[in-house]
Amino acid sequence: MERNLKYPKKVRKELRQLAGIAYDRDMEKALCELESHFRRWRAGEISPHDLNNLIHKHHDGISRELWKFYNLSPDITVPRSVVDGTIREDEISSEVMEHIAESIAFYRKQEDAINENPPDFESNEEDISGFYDDDGNKLNPDLVTKPGLCLLCKNDTDPNEEILCTLNRLDQADEESEFQCEAFEAKD
Ligand code: SF4
């Protein structure tokens, strides 16, 4: 997605490159996991049908999730990748860092807040999609205005997409330009 025209061209280019590197690394990690199942199959630990199911699971699960995530704007994916440890800060130029340092700090605080107060997945599903401001206060995603494009998108009702969709909406909440999303999929 290329919508951050507020950034200089050089910065946008580096952000795209970093997002590409992070995507490659995350995909490599997922493929290593898949490869381990091929070894189990070769060793006779699982059947060919088990392996086939695991290949489908990889394709419909992590592979799809990564594709969707990395279709978000690089100014979301790169800071998130830094917080996840996929991209190291020393791989980022000081010029780009100047533009995304605030986002990295935001996502880091969000991560810390979740780690300090892990969601109770069994008793309170709402916390799964918890979002936090810079002070660690929990935000209510329902207060984020839902763009018209989302109402036409089949991902809008998919609970698995909620976190990425809300991140995307939060990221563009203060912008006057039209909401954009590369992960849009028209309802049938
Ligand atoms: S347009 Fe994008 S943010 Fe909106 S529901 Fe679809 S995938 Fe989610």
Image: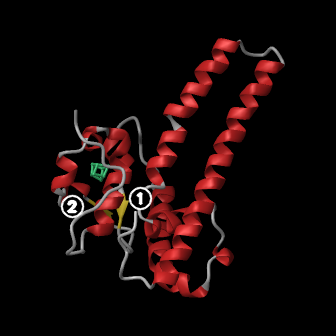
Picture quadrant of residue 58: top right
**Image mark for residue 72:** 1
Residue 129, image x, y percentages: 36, 50
**Image mark for residue 146:** none
Picture quadrant of residue 160: top left
User: In what element is the residue under mark 1?
Assistant: loop
Q: Is residue 1 left or right of residue 181?
A: right
Label pair 1/2, CB-CB below 8 angstroms: no
Residue 36, image x, y percentages: 75, 32
Which mark sits nearer the N-terminus, 1 or 2? 1
Query: On the rendered image, what quadrant is the N terminus found in?
Result: bottom left
Front residue of 136/64: it is: 64
Amino acid carrying label 1: it is Leu
Q: Is residue 144 left or right of residue 46?
A: left
Report the residue marked by disc 2: 144
What is the tally of numbered marks visible in this picture? 2
Q: Residue furthest right?
A: 43
Q: Is residue 27 left or right of residue 174?
A: right
Relative vertical location of residue 56 with respect to residue 28 in this rendering, above or below: above
Of discs 1 and 2, which sits in the foreground?
A: 1
Amino acid carrying label 2: it is Val
